[in-house]
Image (tube, helix red, strand yellow):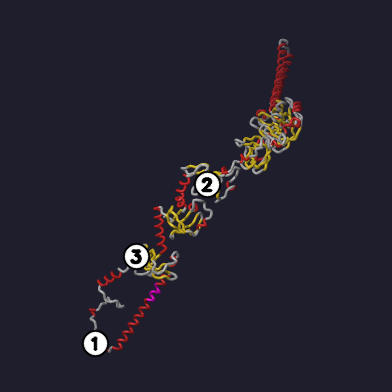
Amino acid sequence: MAKKQVAEKELEAKQAELQDTEKKVKEVFESEADSISIDDIKSKSKVADPEDFDWDADEKMFGNYSKAEREKMEEMYSGTFNSVTKGEIVSGVVVTINSKDVVLNIGFKSDGLVAVNEFRDMPDLKKGDSVDVFVEQREDENGQLVLSRKRAKTQRSWEMINEALENDTIINGFVKSRTKGGLIVDIIGVEAFLPGSQIDIKPIRDYDVYVGKTMEFKVVKINHEFKNVVVSHKVLIEDDLESQKVEIVSKLEKGQVLEGTVKNITDFGVFIDLGGVDGLLHITDISWGRIEHPREVLSLDEKVNVVVLDFDDEKKRIALGLKQLSAHPWESLDTNLAIGSNVKGKIVTVADYGAFLEIIPGVEGLIHVSEMSWSQNLRNPQEFMKTGDEVNAVVLTLDRDDRKMSLGIKQLTPDPWEKAAASYPIGSKHKATVKNMTNFGVFVEIEEGIDGLIHISDLSWSKKVNHPNEFTKVGEELDVVVLELDVENRKLSLGHKQLEENPWETFETIFTLDSIHEGTVTKVTDKGAIIALPYGVEGFVPTKHLAKQDGTVLKAEETADFKIIEFNKDSKRIVVSHARIWEEAKAEEVAEERASKKKDASAASASVKKVKDSVEKSTLGDLDVLSQLKDKLEGDAKKAAKKKEDAK
């Protein structure tokens, strides 16, 4: 829009100049006309022959030129201008500068305009200065030459950036702003990305300190498709430090003390900058005492003296130490400290097998889990103490040469087993707390340090216990009686069922063999079922003995009569049967039937014999007797058949 307004103003100025010229010519003609007579004019006037008139002459009287003359004039005119091509970069001279535009002469038939804001980086720009511009259009819709300095700068920058990448050369850039993960750098109009990891060899915690600075960079990557450029300042520093590293490593010696700066802190150690080369100070070499994290001792950018422990010339790895600069704490340990001495310290580590007690920084002793309590149930030291606890202990072993020490806590209190024989005689009754359970029994504690075992078979007289958790749980109190005591081996055998009389001696008189009792099926298994009998006793029914008379099988919660087929007081085992009851009743019926048939057969045989004996003495009356006997036998046979049918 600004260019169009300038062009309109120039056109108006030229029109005004032309009108002024026409006015002056008219005045001259009028003055000359006043001094010449009409007759002179007529005499001097000559009418041209129509055939000689040049109809191609224009109205503005530019003159009458032949075709050859015109071509010559055009050639001369065009020779005074440069040949300009769209898309090329040319040099222009500043003609004038106003508040909006800069007018440039590039040697073309018209001057070009460039917005002033494209020269912000040239505050001292003045008339006559030369600048490079990009030809966007030779003529726009208003016939104006369109130029751009910004595009010229960008194209020149891209050419320079590509050359810098190909030739591995250094370029300058201005850090414009901070962005996520790094900085934005302006390289002569082209924005490039500087990752945070490529700013310096040491970690940068504040990117803002670099904003507004002009720095040197190397181009490390170009994405031509998206016009992205990645630069690095770190590689310049690394190149400078590489020679320094070689020199520093070549002068290293084991035991040498150097000054360095804490560069980075990790969980496993600290990286120390030794002036161009880094060394690792492992966490175990920071302090003679135990520390959880290096930040407890060191901080970033801190100056510190370290000793060289080891190094690798090829890989340029350097192992450093800090604690080695001071004497080992074991050397300053109290010379009066001996086995049996009482010490006090702080728990620094708790492990599965015990805890480490720090007496003085760098001097630790191990308290094994077995030395923490007289109780045998302590299996996890974390249940007894934690890191940071202040603890008193007794020195059990001490080896100054190997710098090892074992400690104990339970030794601070009397051993309860010394009085166990008097306190817990066999048959004495006590209360105990359930501490742990296994498949074979329950571990209980009568008092701290005095533990005992209740075997699973000693929990109940009548109930069959498959696992102790069916009978009790951890933390419950149980009444117990001492069954066995072994002071030397610190073993105590306890019982719970022995607090009551053995009911199986009474059960032996109740559940006699072949006696019948009512019971309820409580549980069915693959091998049979468990039956709840009177007095809280359980019996076992094999599968084949669960059959009922109607052919079905007893199920859970069913109640029926059972016959005792086995009783063992020692193993507390009762085996019962339901099928045996009706099977034996049926067998008795069959036996009775057989006896009845046998009796009837004997009577018939006697009658027949009697008839045979008296056959020779038969009379008519005897024949009547024989007929009556026959009727009687037939009647007896019918009665026997009916009785058999009823039995079935």
Q: Residues under labels 3 and 1: Cα distance? A: 55 Å
Instruction: Characterize the local packing of mark 2: few (<14), some (14-19) or many (20 or more) Cα atoms within 10 angstroms.
Output: some
Task: Tell me the CA gap for discs 2 and 3.
Answer: 67 Å
Asked whether disc 3 touches disc 1, contact meaning CB atoms under 8 Å apart, the reply is no
Q: Main secondary structure of the magenta part?
A: helix
462 relative to 269 in the view: left or right: right
- Does residue 8 show up magenta in the picture? yes
* Gap in angstroms between the C-alphas marked 2 and 1: 119 Å
Q: On the image, which quarter does residue 6 sit in?
A: bottom left
Q: Are marks 2 and 1 in contact (CB under 8 Å)?
A: no
Q: Is residue 606 above or below residue 252?
A: above
Q: Point out residue 504 in the picture as x, y percentages from the top left corner.
A: 74, 28
Specify the label residue 311 is tagged with: none
Image quadrant where one finds the N terminus: bottom left
Q: Which mark is residue 43?
A: 1
User: Which comes before the other along the chain, label 3 or label 1?
Assistant: 1
Where, by quadrant of the figure, is residue 346 drawn?
Answer: top right
Amino acid at circle 3: Val
Mark 2: which amino acid?
Leu
Which of the pair 557/366 is nearer the observer? 366
The residue furthest top is 616
**Position of 131 compared to 573: left or right?**
left
Q: Secondary structure at mark 1?
A: helix
Residue at the location (66% across, 43% down)?
A: 389
Residue ID at (34%, 82%): 24
Q: Which residue is mark 2?
A: 258
Range covered by the magenta-colored residues = 7-13
